[in-house]
């Protein structure tokens, strides 16, 4: 592809570490030493040597024992994100390229790579960087100051790795427009990092076609993390009536329809999302099995209950109700409410599919919230399956931020 629009000289990437060193306080750095890639501001005793904000520096324990190299961010409570733990392996172009290659080789073994998440931040040891591949288009989201400065190197390495596998990258788009960038002192930005291209991209997942918008769609254009979970609901849906809430682009709804559902009702509060879902239904010849409604799910569910509606399968795939620990209680009330209402609409012996994509809504709290909703709905739940995010979004043990999606399939039984 054409040269990336990046102000970065790859020749200068042999050794990127500055001459500064951060020293950890005695008895601190517990999360990092347990396997996390983060070191917090209150864990650092001092930083010696000259550096600029966002530089790669070395990290040592209170007794000067070498711990690794990481990027420093003076604006964030996550003060250092680690990139290497070996003193003889400074951060270089070769190291970053090997991380990228390892990430791609892993995905080739675990998932269909036609469209997938190629780089998943900390879980691929490239903190703050997410890269999704939609056929021959790459979409990058960069959230960390230090690795933001390295994104050109990482993209260059990825394009080479893909090219070696016979995949020609046609274009790259940046979706670094999340508010969290401001905590790193970064501006929110989005735009082309290659020559411009049509940002409406057609992909195929589980045999279903979708037209996604990498410029204006949610996140990087599409939620790839539910790929396997969407396939998992198919066996429930043959000849079934299905209600898909928070349908977004219609992905769960279309999997249900393709599996032989008699009728799928799909609901979302966004007019553009509903229009896109309708287009995707047309694209797959499934419009006759799908009914799309633009409505607030929190109002729609009790209204349907009031009408005495029932469904064989109810799917709840809401956006994250909390993005911080401060709002967990309010989020739990929201999850409890939609699950309570959803259960009341499931026929006896039917199925509830419910999930949470909030990292802060931990598995124990989510399960407890569903259990409370079942108690209030006067139903019993029989667990069919518990799943997490697709394997192209790997969960790095001892790095809690990489584990966020909880997905249940439950049978609803009334005595």
Image: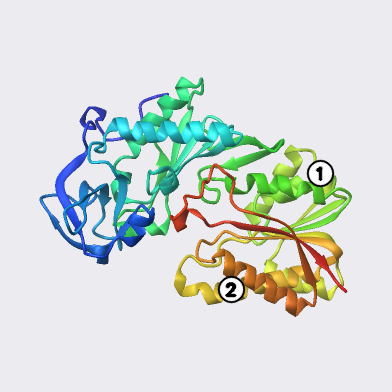
Image quadrant of residue 200? top right
The disc label shown at residue 332, or none: 2
Q: Nearer the viewer, residue 197 or 111?
A: 111
Instruction: Name the residue rendered at 30%, 30% in the picture.
Output: 94
Q: Residue at x 23, y 36 (%)?
A: 88
In the image: residue 137, left or right of residue 244: left
Image coordinates for residue 343, horizontal then vertical, percent = 77, 69
Residue 153 image point, x, y percent: 32, 34
Location of residue 107 with respect to 28 vertically, above or below: above
Q: Quadrant of the N terminus?
A: top left
Residue farthest to the bottom, as pictured: 376
Give the number of the disc on residue 134.
none
Q: Does residue 118 appear in the picture of this structure?
A: yes
Where is residue 236 shown, x and y percent of the image? Answer: 81, 51
- How packed mark 2 is, by other alpha carbons closer than 10 Å (few <14, some 14-19, many 20 or more), is some
Discs 1, 2 touching: Cβ within 8 Å = no
Identify the disc placed on residue 259: 1
Q: Is residue 385 left or right of residue 322?
A: right
Q: Is residue 368 left or right of residue 44?
A: right
Sooner in the amino-acid sequence: mark 1 or mark 2: 1
Q: Is residue 134 visible?
A: no
Q: Give the distance between the C-alpha atoms of the residues marked 1 and 2, in whole angstroms.
A: 32 Å
Above or below, 408 relative to 97 = below
Q: SS for tag 2?
A: helix
The quadrant where residue 63 appears:
bottom left
Residue in the image at 42% along x and 46% along y: 121
Q: Secondary structure at mark 1?
A: loop
Identity of the residue drawn at 30% across and 63% down: 77
């Amino acid at each position: 592809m054409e040269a990336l629009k990046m102000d970065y000289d790859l020749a200068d990437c042999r050794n990127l570490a500055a001459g500064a060193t951060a020293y950890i306080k005695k008895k601190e750095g517990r999360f990092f030493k347990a396997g996390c890639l983060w070191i917090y501001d209150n864990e650092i005793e001092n930083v010696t040597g000259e550096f600029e904000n966002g530089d790669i520096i070395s990290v040592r324990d209170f007794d000067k024992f070498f711990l690794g190299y990481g990027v420093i961010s003076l604006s964030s409570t996550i003060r250092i994100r680690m990139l290497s733990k070996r003193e003889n392996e400074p951060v270089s172009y070769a190291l970053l390229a090997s991380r990228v290659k390892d990430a791609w080789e892993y995905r080739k073994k675990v998932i269909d790579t036609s469209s997938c998440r190629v780089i998943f931040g900390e879980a691929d040891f490239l903190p703050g960087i997410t890269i999704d591949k939609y056929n021959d288009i790459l979409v990058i989201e960069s959230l960390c100051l230090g690795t933001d400065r390295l994104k050109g190197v990482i993209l260059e390495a990825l394009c080479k790795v893909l090219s070696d596998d016979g995949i020609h990258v046609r274009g790259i788009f940046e979706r670094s427009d999340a508010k969290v960038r401001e905590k790193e002192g970064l501006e929110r930005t989005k735009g082309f990092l290659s020559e411009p291209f049509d940002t409406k991209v057609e992909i195929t997942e589980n045999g279903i076609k979708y037209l996604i918008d990498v410029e204006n769609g949610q996140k990087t254009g599409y939620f790839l993390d539910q790929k396997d979970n969407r396939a998992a609901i198919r066996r429930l849906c043959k000849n079934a009536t299905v209600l898909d809430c928070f349908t977004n682009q219609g992905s769960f709804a279309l999997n249900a329809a393709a599996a032989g559902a008699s009728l799928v009702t799909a609901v979302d509060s966004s007019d553009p999302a509903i229009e896109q879902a309708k287009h995707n239904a047309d694209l797959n010849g499934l419009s006759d099995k799908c009914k799309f409604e633009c409505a607030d799910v929190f109002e729609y569910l009790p209204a349907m209950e009031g009408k005495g509606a029932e469904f064989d399968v109810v799917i709840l795939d809401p956006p994250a109700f909390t993005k911080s620990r401060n709002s967990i209680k309010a989020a739990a009330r929201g999850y409890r409410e939609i699950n309570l209402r959803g259960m009341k609409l499931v026929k006896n012996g039917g199925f509830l599919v419910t999930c949470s994509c909030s990292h802060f809504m931990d598995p124990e709290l989510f399960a407890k919230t569903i259990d409370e909703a079942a108690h209030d709905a006067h139903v019993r739940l029989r667990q069919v399956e518990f799943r997490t995010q697709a394997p192209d979004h790997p969960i790095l043990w001892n790095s809690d931020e990489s584990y966020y999606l909880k997905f249940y399939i439950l049978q609803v039984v009334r005595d």
